[in-house]
Amino acid sequence: MYHEPVLKEEVIQYLLNDKNGIYLDGTLGGGGHSEIILNNLTKAGILIGLDMDNDAQKFATKRLNKWTDQLVIAKKNFRDFELVLQEKGIPKLNGILLDLGVSSYQIDTPEKGFSFSQDGALDMRMDETGGTAAVDLINTAPLSELIRIFREYGEERHASRIARVIVAERQSNPVNTTFGLTKLIHRVSAPQHRVKTLARIFQALRIAVNDELQNLRTCLQKSTGYLRQGGRIVVISYHSLEDRIVKNFFRNESSKCECPPEFPICICNKMDTLKILTKRPVTASDAEINLNARSRSAKLRAAEFIL
Ligand SMILES: C[S@@+](CC[C@H](N)C(=O)[O-])C[C@H]1O[C@@H](n2cnc3c(N)ncnc32)[C@H](O)[C@@H]1O
């Protein structure tokens, strides 16, 4: 199993507003959500699936091969999704799905370096053909940058202590593997907090290496320019940093005037572009969590383009 998709029924419920429509799955992964979407479309419907990861693209292409006439798969960062639309002559979409983060396959593949419980090269790039790998960041970033990354993206209280031990060690022994980094974190974390500290530091590095938060912001900002009236945007996030970005974006796009209350008349002329469909984030049922532990932290938010 490449990856078990989360909140399957909820994705269909919130995303699909027209069975003949054109949808974008910006995080194709193993093609799980894409398969469910395609199963719910008529022959006239189209799905565009993007992923930065070569393996995901290959796997999903095989899995979805019975829909080749209705499917466009591209290796692309979802922040640049409009380039694929322009190339295919598609002006507007009925819906956009983002199921953020990494797939189970990526976590379970030691060479990708996402997991602190398996030894592998400290890479963490979803797209292994470009960008800066975690190994370069860990061994060359200034101390202040490592502290910022651990604090901002990992919300790690001991960011400074952990960054200092890395910087001291790397002068004589570059940190090249996941277990190399894990050992250093063990040195400076209390045993009872170790797993959570490791999770926070690995999450922080992954976010920095892949510029995950900026990708999300950029894609959300562009999304409203490419949705038809009534088109939907559905985002599943797995940690509070991502969820906050989605929540704030939806809130901002669904509010009208932003003038200070003391202004007698509106001078900003701000229009609302989205209607929020999920007042609170949708989470997995106990039954789903029992079957798929990954769904425990999933939060789905959806909104509809109303202009
Ligand atoms: C949680 S998995 C998606 C799983 C998928 N929904 C399924 O059902 O199989 C996230 C996927 O999104 C990809 N990804 C993450 N950020 C991306 C980005 N900015 N652009 C393109 N792909 C991205 C990852 O490589 C990974 O394969």
Image (tube, grey):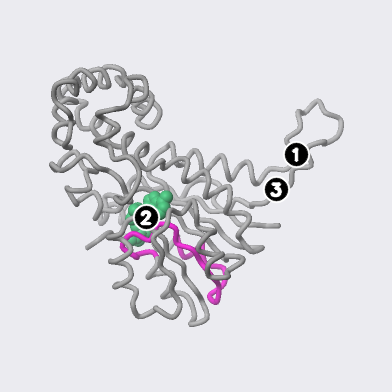
Tally the numbered discs. Answer: 3
Identity of the residue furthest to the right in this view: 264
Local SS, label 3: loop
Q: Secondary structure at mark 1?
A: loop
Rendered image quadrant of residue 56:
bottom left
Looking at the rendered structure, the kind of residue marked 2 is Met
Q: Disc 2 on helix, strand or loop?
A: loop
Q: Earlier in the sequence, mark 1 or mark 3?
A: 1
Circle 3 Cα neighbour tier, 10 Å, few/some/many (<14 / 14–19 / ≥20): some
CB atoms at circles 1 and 3 under 8 Å apart?
no
Identified at 52% across, 43% down, the residue is 217
Query: To which residue does mark 1 refer?
Result: 257
Question: Is residue 26 placed above or below 135 in the rendered structure?
Answer: below
**In magenta stretch: residue 21:** yes
Nearest to N terminus: mark 2 or mark 3: 2
Residue 153 lies, with reference to residue 275, above or below; the image says: above
Tell me the residue that label 2 is attached to: 52
Position above or below: 132 against 139: below
* Residue at mark 2 to residue at mark 1: CA–CA distance: 37 Å
Q: Quadrant of residue 255?
A: top right
- Residue at the image position 32 percent from the left and 40 percent from the top: 132
Quadrant of the rendering where the N terminus is positioned = bottom left
Q: Which residues are magenta?
A: 11-33
Q: Quadrant of residue 136?
A: top left
Residue at image location 16% in from the left, 25% down from the top: 184
Residue 283 x, y percent position in the rendering: 41, 49
Q: Amino acid at mark 1?
A: Cys
Would residue 58 appear left or right of 279 to someone viewing this image? left
70 or 158, which is in the foreground? 70
Would you name the residue on which mark 3 appears? Answer: 272
